[in-house]
Structures are given as C-alpha cells and as structure tokens.
Amino acid sequence: MVQDWLYSTELFERETILRLAAQFENVLRHAVLRPETRLGSLEMLNQDQKRALEKEKDARKQSQRQKLMAVEPKTVKLAEVESKGVSES
C-alpha cells in the first residue's frame, strides 16, 4: 500500500505521522479481511505497537510508584489539624 500524508510540521513530528499511518493501514487491513466487522471493533494497533504501548504504560506506573515511595510521610497531630480549620470530608 502506498500512502501520501500532507501535514503541518509545526504541529506534528514525523514519527507521529508514521505511527498514525501505520495505525490507519492496520484498520484498513482488518476491514478488508473482515468486512462484516463494525468500524469501532477493527484493530488499530499491530502486536508490536501493543507491546510498545504496554511497555510505556508499565514504565509510567513504575515512575509513579518511585515518586510515591520517595515522599517522606509526615506525622500531623489531630489537634493541629482541627486548629487550622481543616475538616474531613
């Protein structure tokens, strides 16, 4: 399949357009292979893209976990909280 994409280089990076083009090609491929499938049910990502997305998601979770673990717990006496007018919701 040959695709030509016209896009603003001020708005998009080349890698983004390449990724979108691959996803579009994937949707078209699945539509041809399974024409009875509803458009919303067609696969947009191939297996490599799914793995990369899962890897990015895991890395984000790990980063968030590390940030949470780096926070030093703070002890606050209940009397201090009440005197500042903070109430529990």
Image (tube, grey):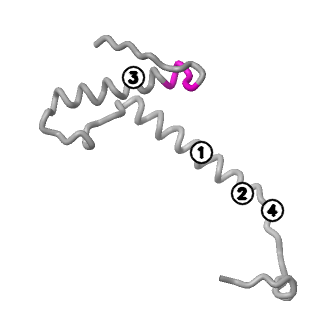
Which of pointers 4 and 1 lies earlier in the amino acid sequence?
1
Q: Residue 89: which numbered mark, if any?
A: none
Q: Which residues are magenta?
A: 11-16
Name the mark nearer the viewer: 3 or 1: 3
**Disc 4 from disc 1: Cα separation:** 21 Å
Give x and y (percent) for residue 27.
28, 30
Task: Determine whether the residue tagged by mark 3 lies in a helix, strand or loop.
Answer: helix
Closer to the eye: label 3 or 4? 3
Residue density around tag 3, few if under 14, some if 14–19, many if 20 or more, within 10 Å: some
Number of the front mark, 1 or 2: 1
Q: Which residue is mark 1?
A: 60
Residue pointed to by mark 3? 21
What residue is disc 2 on? 69
Tell me the kind of residue under disc 3. Answer: Ala
Which residue corresponds to the image point at 12% horizontal and 38% vertical from the top-left? 36
Spatial CA distance of label 3 from label 1 is: 25 Å
Mark 1 element type: helix
Q: CA distance from mark 1 to mark 2?
A: 14 Å
Q: Is 64 placed left or right of 44 in the picture?
A: right
